Image (cartoon, rainbow, N blue to C red):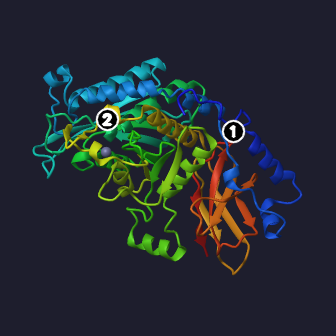
Amino acid sequence: MTESAGSGYPSASFAAPVLLALALAFGAPRCPAQEMAQGQGPAPRLASDPHADSHIAEAIRQVSAERIRQTIEKLVSFRNRSTISAEDEASIKAGTGIGAAREWIKAEFERYSRECGGCLEVKTDSFTEPPADRIPKPTEITNVYAVLGGTDGEQAKRIVLVTGHYDSRNSDTLNGTDPAPGANDDASGTAVSLECARVLSRASNKVKSPATIIFLAVAGEEQGLNGSKHFAQMAKQQAWKLEAVLNNDIVGGDRSSQQDASVVRVFSEGLPAAASETEIKRIRTLGGESDSTSRELARYIADVGRSYDAGVKPLMIFRLDRFLRGGDHYSFNQQGFAAVRFTEFREDFNHQHQTPRTENGIEYGDLSKFVDFDYVAHVARLNAATLASLASAPAPPANVKMQTKDLDNDTTLTWEPSAGAAAYEVVWRSTKAPDWEYVQTVSRGTRATLKVSKDNVVFAVRAVGAAGHRSLPVVTEPER
Ligand SMILES: [Zn+2]
């Protein structure tokens, strides 16, 4: 599908499923969970319950494949964006090297901000990386980011973030001068960050998100995830309420014949990188290996993929990353944050980390001509819909507990109220199911008893805002 594809969006009946669910909870003669327990029919299947916000749907329609093409080609024009390439004034003026790329990205964010009446705060995070394997001398590294502040004083402390890396490399990690176009790796991900900033800042007069969205472009990825490490550590040290990180790296949809442009892979860690020995023991006891906060984020993206017509569907991969490769999401995972990686379905390794050349009839190099700009636009739509949905939703419920005092085939769950929540939903799935299967609305209070055995399923609770936006689900902790 191309940019003009819009007919497939869910209609403006956004609130209808919520109203229906509320009506069921208040006035229906039987609650669906009881029906299931009594063998009279299943609880509502989650997958058949899409929920889209018409303002968010309209915002993501503004994502432009043509703008994304311009961004990627501009980034390629800086010739070599290696972290160790030039960043002196003369090179910036000449438009070569990572310094020029950095200044251009900053200017783009500033332009978007002017267009939305100053709604974005544009910032940099600079530091000097000491010499290491891939850093021959002390090197200044700069992350550039734009902040779209939330509308609610307290809720605005909650943050969701999208990132891509704007540094590039060719066949030699230590070459900062010869062409290293990095069109797919990772001008494509940088373009997703920029385009999300453009469309969501423009839409911010209609999509009133209580939480804050950060659009980030990092450097140093190819030299050792240096930029993202620094940024994630800063977030941790400053105790940011960073709820979700979307890392886009190699989302260009390389035009090979075996590419599947209908999907984008979403990688998520299983056992959290930041889990202590005690936490790992607890995960082992509970069978919680597939319920890291990163995986809940991946499932949230799957839900967004069902609710909005982005033009591409998320394909969840239950693994941190591809073999022999790493990425910036890991820097955030290491600090205990939920973070996932988006990557095209099939990579062409002749078009990554290669000095452009032709050998034995094979063309090597990460060139713009191999990038499918419509595909990048679809991935940007999925990202923008996810960011806006999360930022519009209430905070995820805290202290979500499952009572395990007595042997009991029913299950009682309790949680603390979330600011901005109009209702809650209990979601659950079979222990062997990859994604949430059932949903039960709880329209009053912060407690629910379900006729479903805790031994056979995994439960989580999510908060629902007045306009139907869902928070990330929080998996239950047993309480004795
Ligand atoms: Zn990359």
Callout 1 environment at 10 Å: few (<14), some (14 to 19), or many (20+)? some
Choose between 19 and 252: the one closer to the eye: 252
Callout 2 environment at 10 Å: few (<14), some (14 to 19), or many (20+)? many
Amino acid under disc 2: Ala
Image spot of residue 263 (x, y percent): 50, 46
* Residue annotated with mark 1: 467
The N terminus - image quarter: top right
Hey, which residue is sitting farthest right in the picture? Answer: 29
Q: CA distance from mark 2 to mark 1?
A: 39 Å
Q: Under 8 Å from ligand 1: the CB of mark 1?
A: no
Instruction: Kindly tell me whether residue 154 is visible in this rendering.
Output: no
Tell me the SS state at disc 2. helix
Amino acid under disc 1: Ala
Residue 183: mark: 2
Say which residue appears at 44% left-offset and 24% top-offset. 66
Q: Under 8 Å from ligand 1: the CB of mark 2?
A: no
Q: Ligand 1 shows up in which quadrant of the image?
A: top left
